[in-house]
Image (spheres, grey):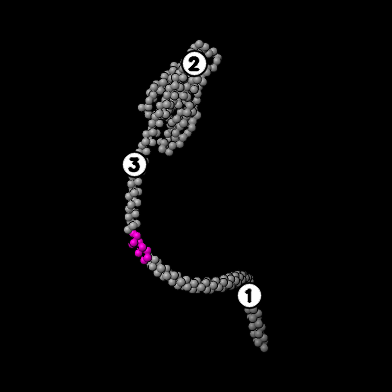
Amino acid sequence: MKKILFIAVFFGASNLFAQQQQDSILVKEIPTIKKDVFQQRQEINSLTKKLNNQQYILNQQKKGLKTLNLKSKKQENIIDSLNQLIKYNSQNIITNSTELGTKIKQTGENANSKFSELDSNLSKNRLYWIIATLTTLLLGGLIYWLLGKRIQSSKTDVETQIKNTKTALEEESIKLDNKLVEVLETQLKLKQEQTKVQPAAANEKADHSLALKVADEVIRIQKNLSRMDESTKGLKQLGSSVQRIQDNFASNGYELVKMLGKEYNEGMKATVNFVQDEDFEEGKRLITRIIKPQVNYKGTMIQTAQIEVTEA
């Protein structure tokens, strides 16, 4: 009996010890189990969110599909309407083509009939038309030749008259300029004699008005001379008179500065009018006209030049 009791106590103690060891192992594994459970919950939450997103996308796609279906139905209705319209137009085209073909056929028959009548009439009158045309051409050619000869003769007469008139005007201009030069020379001589008789006081300003007027007229006459033919009557005499005035100028201390044909530079003291010329050399500026000359008296400028400069 004691043995049995001892054996029972031994097995009970063994079971109790084994149970305590198992409990100790479970207690150690509880944190690991909790961690696994937490991770699984996180994964479940993540999957739930993804599932919700997929459900939202699926709902949006369903709405889009519904909208596309509505548009497709509208497009089908429009296509049906267009098909009906095309069918109607095709019928109209066939009807119009038939009518047009009939009218073209009738018109062709009428035209052929009229052409036949016209050919018949032309064959009768063609000879008369040919004769009339040839007669008209011959008369026209004769009249053209006579008019051309008359016009050429008239043109020659007009050119001769223009040339004679121009020559007469130039000769008359030279006569007037000669008389003007004589008057100017007389005035200059009187001015010189008056200056000798009544010399100006030292502090009195000299009067250059007559000299400036003479200078302007000399420039004008020189410009006119450059445009005239050398064979013009009286041209050489006028040129000699102008040169004589210039010599008189120089002997009394006056100088007409020669600027025509010279290159213009910004340092010149003059009133300048610039003229553009596309055919002129690039970068070159020449004085091509003297409107008023520069006049110096004893080395001092008493009149500023007014010039025209041509540039590209």
- From this view, report whether residue 152 is shown above or below residue 208: below
Residue toward you, 148 or 251: 148
Q: Residues within 10 Å of mark 3 (few under 14, many from 20)?
A: few
- The segment highlighted magenta reads 116-126
Return the x and y of residue 66 as percentages of the image width and height.
58, 72
Is 122 part of what is drawn in magenta? yes
The N terminus lies in quadrant = bottom right
Q: Can you identify the residue that label 3 sits on?
A: 149
Is 241 part of what is drawn in magenta? no
Q: Can you identify the residue that label 2 sits on?
A: 191
Q: Residue at x 65, y 87 (%)?
A: 4
Q: Amino acid at mark 3?
A: Lys
Return the x and y of residue 292 as percentages of the image width and height.
48, 26
Q: Can you identify the residue that label 1 sits on?
A: 26
Return the x and y of residue 144 as percentages of the image width and height.
35, 46
- From this view, report whether residue 31 is shown above or below residue 192: below
Return the x and y of residue 229 as percentages of the image width and height.
37, 29
Q: Amino acid at mark 2?
A: Lys
Q: Residue furthest top?
A: 197
Q: Which label's residue is closer to the chain start, 1 or 2?
A: 1
Q: Residue at x 36, y 66 (%)?
A: 116
